Amino acid sequence: MRNINRTSGQILRRVQSCLFVILFASSLMLSSSVAIEDSRLDPLSSGEDEAVVQPSAFDSFLLDEPPKELSLEERFAKLEKNFTELNENYEELEENYSGVKEKLKSYVVMGHGEESMKLSGRIHVDQWSFPGNSPGTNAFETGDPNLTPQDRLGFRRVRFGVAGSLWKTMEYKIEMEFAAGNDSEFRDVYLGWNDIPMVQTLLVGNQKRPYGLDHLNSSRYNVFLERPFVIEGFNQDARRLGVCAYGYSDDLVWNWRYGVFNQRLIQDEGVYVGDHFQGEGAGRLATTFWYDEPSDGRGYGHFAVAGTLANPDGSGTPGRGPNEAQFRTRPEARSTRRWLDTGQIAGADNYQLIGLENVWNFGPVQLVGEYQHNWVDRDGFEDVRFHGGYAYIAYFLTGDYMPWDRESGTLDRIKPLENFFLVDTCNDGVRGGWGAWQIAYRWSHADFSDQDVLGGVGTSHTLGLNWYWNAYARMQFNAIYGEIDDHFPIAGLTAGHYTILGTRFMVDF
């Protein structure tokens, strides 16, 4: 609306300016014509001065007729008439503008000037192939030991969102996922309040549960294509409906988040239905105990402890909602099924999870490790426990580094020292930049089998190569070898091994 007002005002001012220019130019022409008539009456004029002065093109355009056929009074009258018509047109335009402005009020409501809206999005295009599999992993994926997993090519993420502020201390975010085609889902959807005493920021809505560093990191910044067994297994898709507080210390050494959540994943349903709330309380306390200020954060150290106390509905009573005591994950790649899966754990009354995180960064080298342990208490069955962890090392061949966000205790956006580009120069031929190149290795392990629950025990090794074109685009390549055993029988098979190759091109804005 403000742009419309500004544009219309500029048009009116330009019309006024044109009127004044026409009047001023016409006055000059009339003055010149009077001077010419005076020179013709001057008896001292020479023969050269008696040459006939031809009317200009501007005279003909302004007066419609050659000026030599009109007297001075007639020319003034003609000019006055043209000016009157222009003035009437200007007044009509001003009236029309006022009418349009009034009509727009019924469609566009002016803001109060303290709102903001920022658009964001990301596109991840993946290709996955399964060149080496055993009968066991074939069965885990297809149910048939003789059918191998099929290759995949498509969108991993297609997200579009808006975020901004409301008044001075409120914020909002709405983010949608369109990678599934006709079945869209929401991701972050919340309202927030900032600068709350003793709390700082409070968000209400669908948001990430505060445990698992690799889940709290954005998929835009993670080193590997998919998250480790234990991180995805204990916190599938991460986001839940809840209320969570966020804060950090003035010196940025400490940061924290804690809240209450419903355990049901509702991103495609939009609502939880059930008599049993299946709630949980979760939190995370983190410290950036070392941060090298002189190098702008090329060196840092991070440690965090996180956990949750959850109360699932393990009774299995119909109509009370699904039992959320289930832990499952894919083979750190985009398979169709989850190859590690406990199923819904019967009798699970509550579970307690604790997780530890550690990060060291020395310039182009980064070392990261996490461990999580989950105790599940059951009514009428033996209690069970599951655990797992991962560790990785990453190195930039080009001397770049992984930035760190001390307010949230997570990875930040990588900004290559040199972007990837190719240009054709006039003198030196084709010139270009390499971008940033990073290699990485990850070891991952998870044990989801205990007592009568046989979700499987998985171990994987992943080699990664990342090519950062710029801060907003990159390519990723992963080669994964893994083994699974102690799995509940599928087609009589309880173990298998696999080799998977993955490639991704991603951009975000």
Image: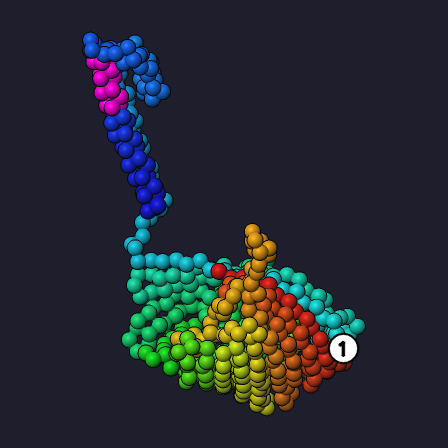
Q: Which residue is drawn at 62% across and 82% down?
A: 443
Q: Which residue is drawn at 75% across and 75% down?
A: 133
Judged left or right of residue 244, residue 22 is: left
* Residue sitting at the far right: 146
Instruction: Inspect this view and state whether residue 147 appears.
Output: yes
Question: Main structural element of the magenta stretch: helix, strand or loop?
Answer: helix
The residue indicated by pointer 1 is 134
| Three-letter amino acid code at the position of disc 1 | Ser
* Relative vertical location of residue 272 with respect to residue 358 in this rendering, above or below: above
Q: Could you tell me residue 285's position as x and y percent?
A: 42, 83
Q: Give the range drawn in magenta.
A: 26-39
Q: Could you tell me residue 374's position as x and y percent?
A: 54, 86
Q: Could you tell me residue 363's position as x and y percent?
A: 49, 78
Q: Is residue 508 magenta?
A: no
Q: Residue at x 63, y 90 (%)?
A: 451
Q: Does the magenta stretch include residue 36?
A: yes
Q: Residue at x 39, y 78 (%)?
A: 294
Depth check, front residue: 293 or 385: 293
Depth check, front residue: 363 or 474: 363
